[in-house]
Image (cartoon, coloured by chain):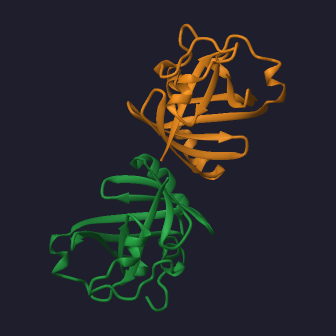
Chain colours: A orange, B green
Amino acid sequence: MAIEIERKFLVEELPVTELQHATLEEIQQGYLIREPDREVRIRRKGELFFLTEKKGAGLSRDEQEIVINEQIFDALWPMTGGMQLEKARSTFMLDGHQLELDVYHGALKPLTILETEFPTEEQALAWSPPWFAGSEVTGDIRYKNAQLAKAGKPDNG
Amino acid sequence: MAIEIERKFLVEELPVTELQHATLEEIQQGYLIREPDREVRIRRKGELFFLTEKKGAGLSRDEQEIVINEQIFDALWPMTGGMQLEKARSTFMLDGHQLELDVYHGALKPLTILETEFPTEEQALAWSPPWFAGSEVTGDIRYKNAQLAKAGKPDNG
């Protein structure tokens, strides 16, 4: 099981220049299990399919990811009814650090979130967010994808 | 991702005395993905349900296991058609070491396999099998569960 250490920020204005060399992927995901301290989700990312478990909350979370296929994804997708979301993810480098910018579709529009991962909590805490990073929502349960999928956009999103 | 280090042996004669204090669980499992170097299986073990990925072959294998539920298990079970098996697992201690004895049902009957896991390869190799352990089949592809589920009992099983 890998530990995922990440920080998340709301984005109000798209960093057009920084995104010029980003790679863009459409992500579709739904939640099969949503418990207070554990989620199991399925995700389509381009032509790849994943089943992922995340445990815990906040800066560091345990994550296990298993590569599945379209047939398994399709069998499980109906079971995620009411807890689904779609977003376009731009992945790009800034000052040698990889950033992910998620632009949500559907009812969550125009929510845009900047996410970035770190090898250690020390590096996560020492990092200075770029100009387009708005309010930090790391550990804010309202901005967890499972919560967004179920409850929709927070009032101040 | 955890590394699974295990040794496996055929068993011809049940160790009746050693099994007196064993715990017994019925296991039902089927394979969703079976690639040369990777398997994804679902398993019911008593009242618990798992989705597991195993990579590699031989003494040490990478393993990731995610707890699912009966609803997910039931949605995926039809997709394991032709690659399913059932067995009764007895778990017991011998000289301070935990052993698992799997008695296969159905077409695989009377196949019986002793399995045991170790924290390191050194301990795995240093271990002396008990009197009821027959031929060692660690790393023998014919005795991998995915292969047993698909191809049935080896001729000399």
Asked if B80 appears above or below A38 in the picture, the reply is below
What is the quadrant of the C terminus of chain B in the image? bottom left
Foreground: A118 or B150?
Answer: A118
At 35% from the left and 65% from the top, the residue drawn is B27
At 51% from the left and 29% from the top, the residue drawn is A122
Asked if A145 appears above or below B52 in the picture, the reply is above
Count the numbered circles shown.
0
x and y percent of residue B145 in the render? Answer: 47, 72
Left or right: where does residue A22 sit relative to residue B39?
Answer: right
Left or right: where does residue B8 sit relative to residue A3?
Answer: left
Q: Is residue A83 visible?
A: no
Left or right: where does residue A74 sit relative to residue A92?
Answer: left
Foreground: A122 or B61?
Answer: A122
Asked if A43 appears above or below B19 in the picture, the reply is above
Asked if B129 appears above or below B91 in the picture, the reply is below
Left or right: where does residue A84 sit relative to residue B59?
Answer: right
Q: Is residue A157 visible?
A: yes
At 79% from the left and 24% from the top, the residue drawn is A19
x and y percent of residue A68 in the render? Answer: 60, 52
x and y percent of residue A61 in the render? Answer: 47, 35
x and y percent of residue B104 in the render? Answer: 37, 76
Specify the farthest residue to the top: A156
